[in-house]
Image (cartoon, coloured by chain):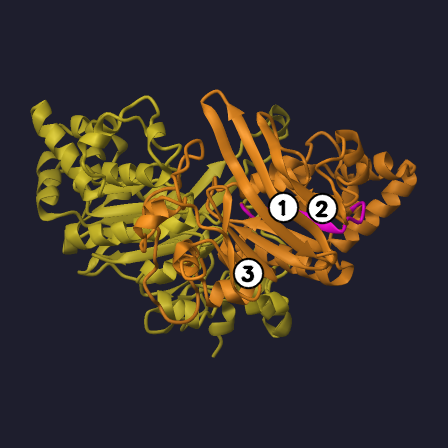
């Protein structure tokens, strides 16, 4: 337990909207070790981005973290005051590569200024020192340091994404959360960005949480995978376990729905229906209305997340009925 | 114009009996606005050459995929065929059904007919006479969130094409047609959907409505512009399988525009890969994916991630350099030469690649590629 860099226990983040409480993240526990990469996959609206924002405590209102613990290097960072968290954890310990690099950069500042800003604010460097570090960072992500004097609109999409990565690395955090880092980028650039993340992981020993809907992309880098559905984790395990031996009917559907470029051409599967409204999630197992192996008990009681083989957890009555 | 060196077989894509659509040297250039200073200085007008000389044919009943990265001109090609954007140059020939052909030629004797196979050169049909052709040529748009009017109910959305084309004389008749279309896309029971607004249904259901709308006029040819890219992976296959069922049932032909080669593999009979406004490779989908010839296709294929966890242990080798040039300044010669890794290995081609545009030639039956590597002999 103690070797885990981050350990999240039973975190709950709800959005208090006029139309009711949206239970976006509803009791999620994850852990990530040093140098490890965890992939979190799920459909849009399953709460995976909210989970990321909860870990770095940037949940936008009307969202609120209403329960749970998050131990980062041994202490519960959810208990820190906002100011303490900002000063000691955010960016220094845990940083984030935001979704949509195109829009995450400020268009009226030079990219160098934007990378240097946290260095000046957090580390108290002078502007010259900060710029020196900025050059190093740009070099590290494969951009000509002279680009520091460009504005975001002068860079291509792939370069902007690299700048976002440089920003996330500026304070040498030990954990980087990448929220859909390559969505809206073309495949060639996507492959280059993934190569960059792999190299950084190896060279810097950082831990990465990769959040995406794309299972093929997760396989590119993740050591472990967690599958989220309707605000809960339904299965998690080592990459090999998830891809070669998916157990939860939802995971199976997802894995079989990914088109492959190589290998035999088997018909693609799909999951009928649509994800539930998180204001009123279905009773029992949240997946049961879409499940193809639903049993009567599934609608009554929620399945616990149990370990079916070492390191492989699944929340489904198919696997836990015997052990109860 | 670039002249071919002698003895070079120019691509032999032809309009034949089986073709439903034939496109030759299609170009769509968008003029860039000049500032007043540029006008005073008499700077030449610049053009974004979105589609810059594309040729292919589509056989009846086929799924023809047009693939490429964003900005390569694949969507513009689809829209230019349907005349949703004006074409700058080139020929588009469509072979309508017998009754439409007769209707078109009898009501409008000046319509440009390509005699042999009852084709009509739709690129020369004036916009005001295009309407009857739209009954047979339809489009499915990419974004089901943006392509349905939020103020219209599903019923109104689907009834509109019937009203415009004066199909169904009474309201009841039209209502019946709308219900049948909803059943066809498996939105059942139809009564449950007729009076809902787009925001009240899920993304997958919305895309079904968009498909139903395209089907209202009983088309034969449909341009499907990234029909599933905005949907969750888990429901993509559902929409695709619906599209394939409808194709069989109604005898449709699809021009399937996609950026996802892995997806194309599952549905397309033939595949054309575009780069900066031109087709660089064209052939049977399986052949192109398993045996890509053009250096660009090779790079594209090597970049596609696979759901295989073994990949995390290796760095992906993507044989391409640099970035896509602007469509305003297309490199001379082969437009890919600035990024080509194969060129580095064959410096003897430098002269050719940087000066002359390679023609699309047939290197094995049905497999075309536009690259000087395959032209020497």
Q: Are marks 2 and 3 on the same chain?
A: yes
What quarter of the picture does the N terminus of chain A occupy?
A: bottom right
- Work out whether A73 lies above or below B133: below
Left-right relation of A258 to A99: left
Which numbered disc, 2 or 3, marks the residue that appears first in the sequence? 2
For mark 1, give the secondary structure.
strand
What residue span does the magenta drawing correspond to? A170-183
Shown in orange, the chain is A
Q: Position of residue A202 (x, y in %)?
A: 73, 63
Image disc number at residue A200: none
Which numbered disc, 2 or 1, marks the residue that appears first in the sequence? 1
Q: Is residue B335 visible?
A: no
**Disc 2 chain ID:** A
Left-right relation of A126 to B342: right
Q: Name the foreground residue: B3 vs A276.
A: A276
How packed mark 1 is, by other alpha carbons closer than 10 Å (few <14, some 14-19, many 20 or more), is some
Which numbered disc, 3 or 1, marks the residue that appears first in the sequence? 1
Q: Position of residue A122 (x, y in %)?
A: 84, 37
Q: In this figure, which residue is indicated by the disc labeled 2?
A: A71
Q: At 48% across and 64% down in the image, what residue appears?
A: A243
Question: Would you say residue A174 sits in the magenta stretch?
Answer: yes
Q: In this figure, which residue is indicated by the disc labeled 1?
A: A9
**Residue lying furthest front in this view?**
A324
Q: Name the foreground residue: B320 vs A295.
A: A295
Q: Position of residue B324 (x, y in %)?
A: 58, 52
How packed mark 3 is, by other alpha carbons closer than 10 Å (few <14, some 14-19, many 20 or more), is many
Image disc number at residue A237: 3
Chain B on-screen colour:
yellow
**Residue lying furthest bottom in this view?**
B377
How packed mark 2 is, by other alpha carbons closer than 10 Å (few <14, some 14-19, many 20 or more), is some
Question: Would you say residue A225 sits in the magenta stretch?
Answer: no
């Amino acid at each position: 337990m103690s070797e885990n860099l981050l350990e999240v226990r039973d975190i709950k983040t709800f959005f208090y909207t006029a139309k009711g409480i949206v239970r976006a993240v509803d009791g999620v526990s994850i852990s990530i070790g040093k140098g490890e990469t965890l992939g979190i996959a799920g459909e849009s609206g399953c709460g995976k981005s909210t989970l990321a924002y909860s870990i770095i405590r940037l949940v936008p209102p009307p969202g609120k973290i209403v329960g749970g613990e998050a131990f980062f290097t041994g202490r519960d960072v959810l208990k820190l005051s906002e100011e303490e968290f900002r000063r000691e954890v955010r960016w220094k310990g845990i940083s984030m590569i935001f979704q949509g690099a195109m829009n995450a950069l400020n268009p009226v500042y030079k990219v160098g200024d934007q990378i240097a800003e946290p260095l000046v604010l957090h580390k108290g460097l002078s502007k010259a020192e900060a710029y020196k570090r900025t050059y190093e960072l740009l070099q590290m992500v494969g951009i000509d340091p002279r680009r520091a004097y460009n504005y975001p609109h002068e860079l291509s999409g792939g370069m902007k994404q690299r700048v976002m990565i440089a920003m996330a690395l500026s304070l040498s955090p030990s954990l980087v959360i990448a929220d859909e880092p390559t969505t809206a980028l073309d495949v060639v650039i996507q492959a280059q960005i993934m190569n960059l993340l792999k190299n950084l992981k190896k060279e810097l020993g950082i831990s990465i949480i990769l959040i995406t809907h794309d299972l093929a992309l997760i396989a590119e880098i993740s050591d472990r995978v967690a599958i989220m559905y309707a605000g809960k984790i339904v299965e998690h395990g080592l990459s090999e376990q998830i891809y070669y031996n998916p157990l939860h009917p939802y995971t199976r559907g997802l894995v079989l729905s990914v088109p492959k470029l190589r290998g035999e051409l088997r018909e693609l599967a799909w999951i009928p229906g649509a994800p539930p409204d998180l204001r009123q999630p279905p009773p029992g197992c949240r997946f049961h209305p879409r499940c193809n192996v639903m049993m009567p008990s599934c609608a009554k009681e929620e399945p616990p997340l149990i370990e079916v083989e070492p390191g492989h957890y699944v929340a489904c009555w198919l696997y836990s009925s015997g052990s109860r | 114009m670039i002249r071919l060196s002698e003895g070079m077989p120019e691509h032999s894509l032809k309009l034949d009996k089986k073709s439903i659509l034939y496109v030759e040297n299609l170009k769509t250039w968008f003029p860039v606005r000049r500032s007043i200073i540029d006008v005073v200085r008499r700077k030449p007008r610049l053009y974004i050459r979105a589609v810059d000389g594309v040729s292919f044919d589509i056989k009846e009943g086929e799924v023809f995929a047009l693939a490429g990265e964003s900005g390569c001109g694949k969507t513009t090609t689809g829209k230019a065929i349907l005349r949703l954007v004006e074409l700058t140059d080139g020929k588009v020939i469509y072979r309508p059904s017998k009754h439409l052909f007769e209707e078109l030629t009898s009501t409008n004797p000046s319509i440009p007919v390509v005699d042999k196979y009852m084709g009509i050169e739709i690129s020369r049909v004036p916009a005001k006479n295009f309407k009857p052709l739209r009954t047979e040529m339809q489009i499915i748009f990419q974004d089901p969130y943006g392509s349905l009017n939020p103020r219209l109910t599903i019923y109104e959305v689907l009834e509109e094409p019937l009203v415009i084309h004066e199909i169904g004389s009474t309201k009841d008749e039209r209502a019946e047609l709308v219900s049948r279309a909803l059943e066809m896309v498996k939105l059942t029971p139809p009564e449950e959907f007729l009076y809902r607004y787009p925001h009240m249904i899920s993304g997958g259901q919305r895309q079904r409505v968009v498909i139903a709308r395209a089907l209202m006029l009983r088309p034969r040819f449909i341009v499907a512009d990234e029909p599933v890219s905005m949907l969750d992976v888990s429901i993509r296959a559902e929409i695709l399988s619906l599209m394939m069922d409808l194709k069989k049932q109604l005898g449709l032909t699809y021009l399937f525009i996609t950026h996802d080669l892995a997806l194309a593999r599952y549905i397309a009979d033939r595949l054309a890969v575009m780069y900066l406004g031109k087709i660089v490779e064209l052939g049977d989908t399986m052949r192109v994916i398993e045996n890509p010839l053009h250096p660009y296709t090779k790079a594209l294929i090597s970049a596609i991630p696979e759901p295989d966890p073994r990949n995390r242990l290796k760095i992906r080798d993507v044989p391409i350099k640099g970035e896509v040039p602007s469509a305003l300044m297309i490199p001379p010669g082969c437009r890919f030469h600035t990024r080509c890794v194969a060129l580095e290995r064959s410096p003897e081609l430098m002269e050719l690649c940087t000066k002359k545009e390679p023609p699309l030639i047939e290197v094995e039956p049905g497999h075309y590629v536009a690259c000087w590597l395959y032209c020497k002999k």
